[in-house]
Amino acid sequence: MAETKKKTSLFKRKSTWVALLFIVLYAFVFAIPYIFPAYNELMHPHKLEIGPQPTEVSLAGSPLNNTFFGVILTSLIFIFVVVVLGRGVRKPGSKLAVMAEMAWGSVQSLTSTILGHEGERYEVAVGSFFGFILIGNLIGLFSGLALPFFGVSKNFKMLIPPTTDLAVTTGLAISAIVYIHTQYIRVRGLKNYLGHYVKPFAFMIPINILEEISRPLSLAVRLFGNLTGEHIVLEVISGLVPFVIPIAIMVLGLFTGFVQALVFTMLFLVYLQSAISSKGGH
Amino acid sequence: METWIIKAVSIFAGAFGLAIAAFGGAQGQGKAAAAALEAIARQPEAGDRIFTTLILSLALIESLVIYALAVALVLIFVI
């Protein structure tokens, strides 16, 4: 009696049906490429090509990259976020005001831990670098998103994060380094700036110049390499199992994107500190 | 014939070199993280400063591995 009761109750349990549903769903997902051969072409059109890919959209005769659209989208999102938060500040006590104060407070605390009281005038630069790189990294979470609904072109399939392009990261690093050199001259004068190249001895000039060159190089390659590696892992995993499993890699990507934005900003602050501190050098 | 050999050797070199770099980087990062955890456990009120320094040093250690990754990418995809 009891055995038959158990047998009948097996299919009355909710968990049985949920498990069956998942099995059917998984079977369906794995069968899709065999049922519809066009599925692979639609979902994974890129055969693991790293970096930017040209699209069919062209400006003045030359095709535009995916990176171009990525940078524009990142800038638009960043400007939108800043404008919305800035409006919230004017209404004290609202949710937006609290969010804006939290974001700005974290930027302020990051700046003041490294620069101290001198850091107040550099908060805007720090916040801009951090925000742009963070949003640019997090766009990579939508990289599996095919964009047929844009209707722009057939080749404009995939949204790549702009920080997986070496050109973008080099641009960010060079702008950071130019800003740092400008601040060096502004704070400590042109004489000190030219003097720090010959600091221990005169024949150290090539080594000092090499050091100044290696800083933007390492900033750019670090950001590019980290984001590209994570992006490749995400693409490989979502090419193998395009269902549920990539979520784990995406969570890792959330963390990596945040940490890399933090690291870029922190190194920018450390270089800035070594440039403007009166003790000189590092 | 010769390009085939070059391609095979460069792919092998990329994977092998990245494995060596990841090994060394993991050793260094493990030591740094262990020391930082010990320091935070001993002195929790200095946690923020230690965490900042830890992230910086991890990034600087990681950058060498990332250089190896960049070289491996060039070896595998470009050559």
Image (cartoon, helix red, strand yellow):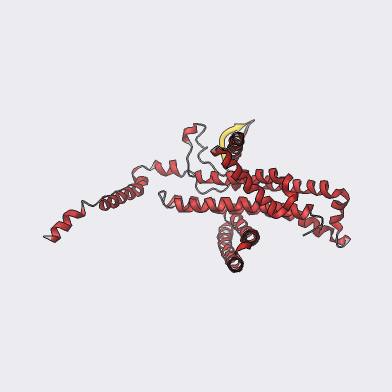
Res A220 seen here: no
Res A238 seen here: yes
Say above or below: A39 vs A259. above
Residue A9 in which image quadrant: bottom left
Question: How many numbered markers are drawn?
Answer: 0
Instruction: Give the x, y percent position of residue A154.
Output: 50, 35
Quadrant location, the N terminus of chain A = bottom left
State the residue in front, A192 or A72. Answer: A192
Q: Residue at x 48, y 41 (%)?
A: A145
Instruction: Give the x, y percent position of residue B7.
Output: 57, 58
Say above or below: A265 vs A81. below
Q: Residue at x 44, y 43 (%)?
A: A43
State the residue in front, A106 or A222. Answer: A106
Instruction: Give the x, y percent position of residue A157.
Output: 50, 39
Residue A132 in which image quadrant: top right
State the residue in front, A260 or A152. Answer: A260
Quadrant location, the C terminus of chain A = bottom right
Residue A208 in which image quadrant: bottom right
Q: Residue furthest left?
A: A1
Instruction: Give the x, y percent position of residue A110.
Output: 66, 51
State the residue in front, A163 or A156. Answer: A163
